[in-house]
Image (tube, coloured by chain):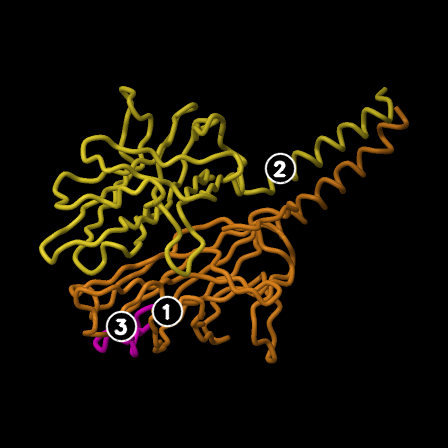
Chain colours: A yellow, B orange
């Protein structure tokens, strides 16, 4: 014979279970602050997020600014980074920047999930544009880590704005968006 | 034993009720797809002026989110929660004005809350001499936002950073492809949780 309070407990856990199931297993994070880049055509520079940047999270182990997959599975990933080099130049100058979305950076299992390239030219060296990662499905293992990197390509003929107070990853004029990443578990 | 047999049917009925309720929540979805044309004027310095895209009830493909009748003129979020929004514009800046000059244009979706218009999902495009006079596909990829009951949601474009006026920016289709999709967007409710979101 089950005491009545055990039944109530079971009912409570069933309710919580169903409620949890009803929420889409996704993760969305966006930067609340602008991010500075250095003039460096050799090294990649990380785009990081903080705890307060999380909008929605049911699937990611987020700690110490790392985005780790909590459970093996199939996931859809997309995102964007808005970059404005913030300089002027001459008519024959150009700046090439790449943004990479990487799985397990620096590990043997490193994989480029997506890379977006943009070339800035005379007249728009100081106009922001979105580097866009369109939705794409991936199979991830537990503890796979997702990172975002920018790289100023060595083909660039002029440096980005190097003023330490200037942040290249920033809100474009008229928009509040800076950079964001979405990871959604694909339920099959 | 008496207690257990008394509760079991209620267990089942309640579980089915909750499942049914949650199942219905998961289909709160809106899909809009249009081939309509619309022209936009972009002016230097007008980055705060939202240029809204006209919508047509007949272009609503599916709707289980908004309460819409013949008098509806705005899409109003009926219940607070987390939503996923995404969209697509077939857009042509349609000008020859961009030559070694700034032409940043914003495309996306706006919430109007207490009279304040703000992009909740967006893509920024910077046009050049080579891209100023051609149709391109501008995607606003899935973005998760917390929307409060009562806020208005609308597709909109706006001037970003611009040097010269643009008078014929065009959402629409090429002459030889009049039935293309010029605007498509969807909104899906993904959670009923309560929260708040001040920044996007």
Across and down, in percent, residue A127 comes to: 28, 57
> In the displayed structure, does residue B99 sit left or right of residue B155?
left
Does B177 lie within the magenta span? yes
Q: Looking at the magenta stretch, what is its main secondary structure?
A: loop
Residue at the extreme left of the image, as rendered: A92
Chain hosting mark 1: B
Total numbered labels placed on residues in the image: 3
Residue at 21% over, 73% down = B97
> In the displayed structure, does residue B7 sit left or right of residue A62?
right
Of residues B72 and B2, the one nearer the viewer is B72
Across and down, in percent, residue A108 comes to: 27, 19
Residue on which the image places disc 2 = A20
Camera-nearest label, 1 or 2: 1
Across and down, in percent, residue A37 comes to: 30, 39
Residue at 53% over, 62% down = B111
Chain hosting mark 2: A
Residue at 60% over, 71% down = B68
Which stretch did the figure color magenta? Answer: B165-181
Confirm or deny contact between disc 1 and disc 3 (CB under 8 A): no
- Whether residue A188 is visible to the viewer of this picture, yes or no, is no
Residue at 28% over, 26% down = A110
Quadrant, the N terminus of chain A: top right
Residue on which the image places disc 1 = B45
Of residues A108 and B131, the one nearer the viewer is B131
Confirm or deny contact between disc 1 and disc 2 (CB under 8 A): no
Does B140 lie within the magenta span? no
| Mark 2 neighbour class, 10 Å CA radius: few under 14, some 14 to 19, many 20 or more | some
Residue on which the image places disc 3 = B164
């Amino acid at each position: 014979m089950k005491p009545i309070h055990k039944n109530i407990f079971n009912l409570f856990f069933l309710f919580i279970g169903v409620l949890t199931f009803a929420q889409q297993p996704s993760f969305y994070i966006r930067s609340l602050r602008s991010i500075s880049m250095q003039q460096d055509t050799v090294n990649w520079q990380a785009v990081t997020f903080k705890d307060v940047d999380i909008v929605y999270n049911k699937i990611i182990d987020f700690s110490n600014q790392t985005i780790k997959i909590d459970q093996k599975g199939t996931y859809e990933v997309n995102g964007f980074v808005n970059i404005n080099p913030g300089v002027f130049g001459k008519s024959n100058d150009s700046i090439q920047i790449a943004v990479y979305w990487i799985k397990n950076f620096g590990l043997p299992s490193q994989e480029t999930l997506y890379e977006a390239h943009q070339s800035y030219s005379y007249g728009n060296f100081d106009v922001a544009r979105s580097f866009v990662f369109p939705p794409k499905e991936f199979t991830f293992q537990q503890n796979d880590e997702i990172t975002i990197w920018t790289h100023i390509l060595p083909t660039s003929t002029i440096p980005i704005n190097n003023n330490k107070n200037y942040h290249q990853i920033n809100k474009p004029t008229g928009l509040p968006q800076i950079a964001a990443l979405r990871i959604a578990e694909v339920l099959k | 034993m008496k207690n257990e047999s008394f509760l079991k049917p209620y267990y089942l009925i309640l579980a089915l009720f909750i499942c049914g309720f949650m199942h219905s929540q998961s289909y709160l979805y809106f899909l809009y797809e249009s081939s309509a044309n619309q022209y936009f004027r972009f002016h230097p310095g007008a980055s705060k002026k939202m240029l809204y895209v006209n919508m047509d009830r007949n272009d609503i493909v599916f709707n289980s989110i908004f309460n819409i009748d013949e008098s509806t003129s705005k899409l109003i979020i009926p219940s607070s929660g987390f939503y996923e929004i995404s969209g697509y514009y077939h857009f042509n800046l349609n000008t020859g004005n961009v030559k070694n000059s700034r032409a940043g244009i914003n495309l996306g979706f706006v919430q109007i809350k207490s009279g304040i218009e703000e992009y909740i999902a967006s893509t920024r495009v910077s046009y050049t001499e080579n891209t100023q006079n051609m149709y391109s596909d501008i995607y606003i990829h899935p973005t998760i936002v917390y929307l409060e009951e009562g806020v208005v949601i609308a597709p909109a474009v706006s001037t970003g950073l611009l040097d010269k006026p643009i008078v014929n920016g065009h959402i629409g289709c090429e002459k030889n492809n009049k039935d293309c999709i010029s605007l498509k967007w969807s909104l899906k409710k993904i959670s009923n949780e309560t929260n708040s979101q001040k920044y996007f």
